Image (cartoon, helix red, strand yellow):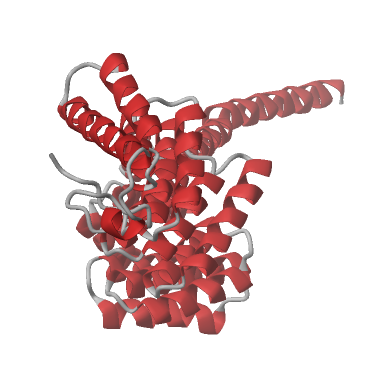
Amino acid sequence: MNRIIVSLAGFLFIVAGLSTAYYQTNISAKEDQSQAIVEKIAEGEEYLKQSNPQSKEKAISIFSELAGKRGIEKYEFQIKYNQARALEKNSDFYPALDIYKDLKKNTNLKPDEKERLSYSLGNLLLKIGNESEGKVHLESVLQSSSDNKLRSKSFLSLADHYYRTGNFETARKNYTLALQEDPNNTESRIGWGRSLRKLGKDWASFDVFDEYIETADQLAGADEKVVGEYKDSVLKDAKDNYTKKQYTKAVELFQKVISVNPTPKKEEEALYYIALSFDAMGKQTESLTYINKVLNNSDYSLDQAALYKKGTIYFRQGKFEKAAGIFQTIVDKYPKNQITDKAIAWKKESLDQFTDHNDLDGSDVSSDSYSSKPGSVSTKPDSGNDLEF
C-alpha cells in the first residue's frame, strides 16, 4: 500500500513538473509576447500624437514591424489601423487607403472599430478628392455613432473639405456643429474663425481667435503657428485697406494688431500706419499723437520715417521753424539715405517759408495779397500727401 502511495505521489510530482515546464515554455512565453506587443502599440500611439517628422517615421516603423509578425490576431485591427494612420499622417495616402479598405472587409469588427474605420476612410477619401464616397462614410458615422468626439471629428472633416473647396458658409456651419459635439475641439474653433474671415466677418473672427488664445493660454498654451497666422492676417488686411485708401477701416485693423500682443517691430509698423492713415484723412492732431508713440516705443525701425512725416505735417500747418528743426534732426541723426536727402530739401523750403512769413509780418501787404502769393503754403490740412523734391 505504501509503495502504491509513493508511486502515485511520484507520478503527480512528474505531472506537476511537466505542467510547470509547459506553462513556462508556452503559455508564459505567449503572455510575454502579448505584453511586448501591447507595449509596442502604446509606444507607437505616443509617436502618433506628436507632429515632428521623426515621430511619424518611428510610428510607421513600429506598426509596420508589428503588422509583419505572427500571432497578432488579437491585436490585428489596432496594429493595422494605426499603421494606416501613421502612413496617412506622413502623406502616404494611397497605402493608408489600401489598409483601411482591407480592414473594412473584416466582418468581425466591433461596433466602435467600424465607426472609427468609417471616419478614417471618409476623412482620407475627402483629402484625396473622392467627395461622394468620403461623405457616405462620414454620414454613416453621424447616423450611427453616439461618440461625441468621433462625431465632432466627422463634422470637422466635412468642414475642412468645404473650406478647401471654397464653400465657406457650409464650412462655417459644419465647424459650429463640430464644436457643439465637442467644445474642446480646437481645430474646429480655429476653422470656424478662418471661415468667418473668408466670409468678411472680421470682428466675429477676431472674437473667436481671441477666445481661443485666452482659453489655450490658460491650459497648455495656444498653437504658436495658429496665433502667428492670425496676427499676420490682421496686419495684412490692415495694410490692404490702407493701400485701397479705406483709411477708417485700416485704422481699426491696425489698432486690432496692437491689441493682440504683437512683436515690437509689428507694433511699430501698426502705429506708423495709423499715423499715416489719420494724416491721409486730414486728422493731423491724431496723426501726430501716433507719430509720437512710434518715436517713444522700444523699436526704432520706423523712427526716421515717422520723424520725417512729423516734419511735413508741421510744414503743412505753417509751423516752419519747428519743421526745419525736425528735418535738421533727421540729417544729423541718421546716415545719408533717401529720407535724409528729402529732409535737406524740406529744411531749405521750411526756412525759406519761415523767412518769407517774417518778411510779410513786417510789411503792409494785405492778407488777400498774401494768400494769392505764388509759392505760399496754406495751413489748411490737405490729403496728407508729402511734397516731393
Left/right of residue 369 with respect to residue 173 in the rendered view: left
Q: Against 264, is 195 above or below?
A: below
Q: x, y (%) of residue 286?
A: 50, 50
Q: x, y (%) of residue 76?
A: 42, 53
**Residue drawn at (32%, 40%), measured in percent from left and top?**
357
* Nearer to the camera, 99 or 245: 245
**Residue drawn at (37%, 52%), measured in percent from left and top?**
379
- Seen as rendered, the residue at the extreme right is 1
- Total labels drawn: 0
Left/right of residue 156 with respect to residue 303 in the rendered view: right
Left/right of residue 5 with respect to residue 205 in the rendered view: right
Quadrant location of the N terminus in the rendered image = top right
**Residue drawn at (37%, 70%), measured in percent from left and top?**
198
* Nearer to the camera, 79 or 270: 270
Q: Against 225, is 382 above or below?
A: below
Q: Against 95, is 156 above or below?
A: below
- Seen as rendered, the residue at the extreme front is 364
Q: In which quarter of the image is residue 320?
A: top left
Q: Can residue 223 be seen in this view?
A: no
* Nearer to the camera, 264 or 42: 264
Q: Against 18, is 108 above or below?
A: below
Left/right of residue 204 with respect to residue 341 in the rendered view: right
* Nearer to the camera, 33 or 228: 228
Quadrant location of the C terminus in the rendered image = top left
Q: Can residue 355 be seen in this view?
A: yes
- Seen as rendered, the residue at the extreme left is 389
**Residue drawn at (30%, 36%), measured in percent from left and top?**
359
Q: x, y (%) of residue 3?
A: 81, 21
Q: x, y (%) of residue 327?
A: 30, 27
